[in-house]
Amino acid sequence: MKKIVFVVLLLIISIGAVEKVYVGSKESTEGRFKVDEQQELSIKQAIELAYPAALEWDENAQLLDAVNIDLDDKAEKSIGSNGKRKYWNINFGVPDTHMNFLVTIYKGEIEEKKDLTVDGNSPYPKKDFIALEDIKYDSPELLKKALKMGNVYPGKDWAKGYSFMLIKNRETNIIMMLVVGWNSDGAEMKAAGFNASTGEYIKPD
């Protein structure tokens, strides 16, 4: 689990060059789901928003992973306390190819769409991909579970609040959602893992 937390940390602080892309009005977005007053989305809402752009890129595109970015939230005190964030990176690929596509979301809209395909990379096997219908539990629900367990606390100085990541475990084939925070004294990062299909807690290795 410590290795996973380190990977998540690298992902949430990674920032690429951003080019704003208009994808439609706020009203069209709200037709599928409600964007709250802070223009924050849950992890599943962010994936649903990003999917059409991925399918425009390639009709066989499927979800690889999703993670919030630790950006533009520095001044806020309770980031992620509702299970939602403003900034998301949603990563897609095409099974059995090395094709890769990243959608960045900010405040309920797509901010960047970028083809990250690199020739020569190993192809993504089918087992690495996540079916949207298999994500039964969203980040707000699983944050509540993590808080009841009492072992994950919000970050205060940097990597503030709570972060969220959705990945597929290659060894177990489990779709895992991570709620990432800190220990009680803020000395080290902690993560609570859950099966996104069943909601069950996944014990750290």
Image (spheres, rainbow, N blue to C red):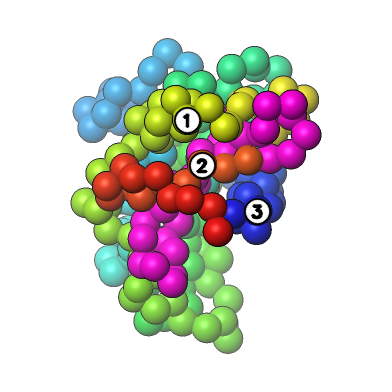
The numbered dot on residue 149 is 1
Residue at disc 3, secondary structure: helix
* Marks 1 and 2, the one that precedes in the sequence: 1
| Residue in the foreground of this view, choosing between 183 and 73 | 183
Mark 2 is surrounded, within 10 Å at the Cα level, by few (under 14), some (14 to 19) or many (20 or more) other residues, namely: many
Distance in Å between CA atoms under marks 1 and 2: 9 Å
Q: Is residue 175 magenta?
A: yes
Q: Residues within 10 Å of mark 3 (few under 14, many from 20)?
A: few
Q: Decide which of 154, 135 is in the foreground and name it.
A: 154
Tell me the residue that label 2 is attached to: 192
Amino acid type at mark 1: Met
The disc label shown at residue 2, or none: 3
In the image, residue 29 sits, relative to residue 124, either above or below, namely: above
Element on which disc 2 rests? strand
* Drawn side of residue 145 relative to residue 158, left or right: left
Q: Quadrant of the N terminus?
A: bottom right
Within 10 Å of the Cα at label 1, are there few (<14), some (14-19), or many (20+) other Cα atoms? few
Q: Is residue 112 visible?
A: yes
Residue 151 location in percent, x, y?
A: 57, 32
CA distance separating discs 2 and 3: 11 Å
The percent position of residue 28, horizontal first and vertical second, equals 27, 29
Q: Is residue 140 magenta?
A: no
Residues under numbered marks 2 and 3 in contact, where contact means CB atoms less than 8 Å apart: no
**Magenta extent:** 162-189
- Compared across the picture, whether 27 is left or right of 73 comes to left
Q: Quadrant of the C terminus?
A: bottom right
Q: Regarding mark 1 in the picture, which secondary structure is present there?
A: helix
